[in-house]
Amino acid sequence: MTARWMYLLFPQLYLQQVISHQPDPEPLARQPVALILQHQQRHIWQCNRAAQAAGVEQDMPLNTAMSLCPALRLLPMDMQQQQQILHARAHWAGQFSAFVSPDPPHGLWLEIASMLRLFQGPDALLHQIQQAAADEGWPLQPGIGQTPLMARIRAHLNQPFVSDNRDLPLLTLAQLQQGLPLTPPQVYQLQRLGIQRLQDIQRLPLSGLASRLGVPFSQTIRRLLGMESHPLEAFHSEEMFQQQVNFIHEVEYSNGLLFPLQRLLKRLSEFLQRRQLSTRLLELQLSHRQQPDTDWQIRFAHSEHQHSQLVFMLRHFLENRRLSAPVQSLVLRVTQFTRRSRGQTNLLAPASGSYAGEDSTQETGQLLNRLSARLQPQQLLRLHTEPDPRPEQASRLMPHQEKSENIGTGALHPHTGPRPVWLLPEPRPCPRPQQIIAGPERICSGWWDEQSIRRDYYVCQQDGQILWLFRSPRGWFIHGVFA
Amino acid sequence: MPLPLDQVIASGQVWQGRTNADCQPEHSVLDTGFRRLNEALPGHGWQSGQVCEIYAHSGHGEVSLVLPALARLSQQPRWILWVGSPHSEGAKLLPQAAALQQAGVDIRRVLLVHPKDEQQAMWSLEEGLKSGHCSAVLGWPGQLNKPHIRRLQLACSRHQSYCWLWPRIPFDPSGSPAAVRLGIERRSPTELSVECYKRRGLWPGQPFTLTLPDTASGKTALPVHSLQTQ
């Protein structure tokens, strides 16, 4: 048999997802927790082990469940969130196959026939997927089959891969019902026909079954057995990143957000890595019980994609923030991306200390990001020169910005005399100097912009210091220090 | 039978203070641009991975000492991080781009940090050294704790960058974890007296005199006019 399809079944997907994003998931896993659907609030939709131990079951009326287990925590879940969670898993599965098709609510189909050579066989692929899911801490039941439906049955039966399909005709109706979209009336009717296993169905003419049980049923059987193609809708990832976390206990301190954010940032960095993108702007939306939502925008000095760097910057960002109210849920959204400039590094990397290679913007940007995570923008400066005779205009300090490629490329005025390394922010009045070493250099300029100066600059020595002084109509001033 | 001393020395079991070439191979050495200073420093130049403290009053030529090295380092596509600045009678001095350009430093590589307090200054210095994206880190700390210097020295030696500090406090004779400690005083406009308080691998040396290039009076050599004529 050729393995063409894989089905990934995530049991308790939503419950597990909600719990794993809490700031302290360990104690919560032991508490009884149940999910209810937004549009069907009177019934339990999913519940965890602790709740099951107390007697709570799926589809149980809410009142019954609450009287059985008063400590039960209920969490609402809407369709949009469901879709987001399943799409996040589809993103993750994209690393194993190019064709992923979501099968709500709990499953994904993966086309694997074209991937078998890459992963060296179905067993190795299966092992890798199970390993990757275990690393994330997700329960996973995979299944491999010749048709999508066969893979789905295998996943539900938790028998991932049977190389020859010997057991297939022997599957009972109850087993088939788990993996196939069969309604209870259809199963009842099959039982009345005396059918117990799949081989009994295979023996009957399909046209006859279609007239008795309806066309959809015979279509399902034909698709299961591979007699008819099974069209699946391919999952196309959006060019935007958005993930949400709902908290069971409201988070009161900004540091408490860091734990769930670390997981989200890991997803984000994988998302960026797969697309060879990076980002400069994270949007964080916090929703509160009574207040309107808080929107935070986190800008980086340089675009970034690495998980450790993102966490570092977010930690510093959160350190300086206070929550206006406890947070119920959090959305991390990234909509603006930049292409990574060059992914290639020099194979024959020069030894440390002799960087003869090309400008590595990515690397130098990282330091800027880390510094600006803690410092204010006006604390991080670059030097710039202008061909202006006036010292204040010729040498300037500018705050660093991303679009600052031309900073520091300006030339000097051709008749610039000796300049001291240090300049006083404001010229300071001083007495007439005793010992003049060089000068004067007359600078008489700036009539065009209200800042005209008329100065004679001298280099003078005072108590061992070499100073840069000028004489103007208003007297003598110290302007710089030769160091 | 006891071994002759020559054999013990030849087998490399005895470390000798006077061997100036005692530079670990993993350190790269940068020419200081001054012959006398090269001779005085272990390894014949500034060694990477070593913190160097320079004690001087501002205006005594303390930055001129490293400008040739900075000019060389600015050829690398990495930052030269300046953290803080010296003070003059309460006013913060600001580096002048024109002077650095005249000294041959590519100012596109210069990144300035104006720290709010000493803690932020130390953090920025260490972050610069740890990142490995700085060819040199320059600092003007207002206070020096030995554990801080030790941290900087460790970060510096791990990432093989150059680090110069100009402490704004008087020389502390009780010692410091920095590898090199120099004291600078200006003798004349172009002559500096340099004293080596500490150099790793060598004894502290005698003060010596260094001749600076004539930057103050400039290459254009402006004529000196007497004040009386004006």
Image (spheres, rainbow, N blue to C red):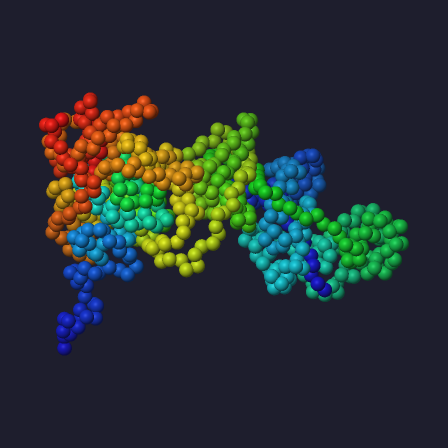
**Of residues A311 and A171, the one drawn nearer to the viewer in this rendering:** A311
**Of residues A168 and B183, the one drawn nearer to the viewer in this rendering:** B183
Give residue A146's quadrant in the image. bottom right
- As displayed, is residue A67 above or below residue B44? above
Answer with left or right where residue A371 lies relative to residue A155: left
Q: Quadrant location of the C terminus of chain B?
A: top left
The percent position of residue A16, horizontal first and vertical second, equals 60, 45
Q: Residue at x 18, y 59 (%)?
A: B20
Answer with left or right where residue A14 lies relative to residue A280: right
Q: Residue at x 34, y 44 (%)?
A: B109
Q: Is residue A472 visible?
A: yes
The percent position of residue A38, horizontal first and vertical second, equals 67, 35
Q: Residue at x 14, y 35 (%)?
A: B224
Q: Residue at x 45, y 55 (%)?
A: A345
Q: Is residue A266 visible?
A: no
- As displayed, is residue A337 above or below residue A229? above
